[in-house]
Image: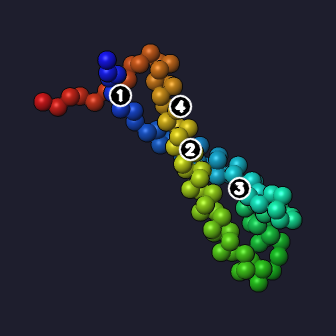
Amino acid sequence: MQMAAKQFQTNYRILTLLAILLFVGLGFVDPVAGVAKGDCSLWSYVGIIFRTNRAVAEEIGPKIVYMALLTAMVAVVIAWVLQALIVVLYSRLRGGRHQSPKPQA
């Protein structure tokens, strides 16, 4: 017995919203908590740039870019999985009234 394959469409609005929310939230996570002294989260480094002089900003600028890119990648991957779950669950709650691809002759 085989299950009929359903093709679900990516909901880019949900994906974008979740990715932004996760990026902001993950920015507060300290990746080296307990190992290093002080707050090493992305947003704490961004705050340092606004409170200090240009020399310090130039020194930690590359670290901020690296942390932001890494955080963004993690946020997008998690958001993609979450939006896929939301789309599938929403489709099932609607009663399976889902447009499946038309078979080609």
Question: In the rendered structure, which amino acid carries the disc numbered 4?
Answer: Ile
Residue at the location (56% across, 38% down)? 82
Along the viewing direction, whichever of 58 and 71 lies nearer the viewer: 71
> Residue 13: where, in percent of width, then height?
51, 41
Q: Badge 2: few (under 14), some or many (20 or more) residues near its Cα, within 10 Å?
A: many
- Residue carrying label 3: 27
Marks 4 and 1: in contact by CB < 8 Å? no
Marks 2 and 3: in contact by CB < 8 Å? no
The CA span between labels 1 and 4 is 15 Å
- Residue carrying label 1: 6
Q: The N terminus is located in which quarter?
A: top left
Q: Which colour scheme appears in the figure? A: rainbow
Residue at the location (78% across, 63% down)? 40
- Residue 63, by quadrant, is bottom right
Q: Badge 1: few (under 14), some or many (20 or more) residues near its Cα, within 10 Å?
A: few
Question: In terms of sequence position, does the residue under pointer 4 or pointer 3 come before the other?
Answer: 3
The CA span between labels 1 and 3 is 36 Å
- Residue carrying label 2: 79
> Residue 7: where, in percent of width, then height?
35, 32
Question: In terms of sequence position, does the residue under pointer 1 or pointer 4 come before the other?
Answer: 1
> Residue 15: where, in percent of width, then height?
52, 43
Question: In terms of sequence position, does the residue under pointer 3 or pointer 2 come before the other?
Answer: 3
> Residue 76: where, in percent of width, then height?
55, 50
Question: In terms of sequence position, does the residue under pointer 1 or pointer 2 come before the other?
Answer: 1
Asked which secondary structure carries label 4, the reply is helix
Q: Residue furthest right?
A: 37
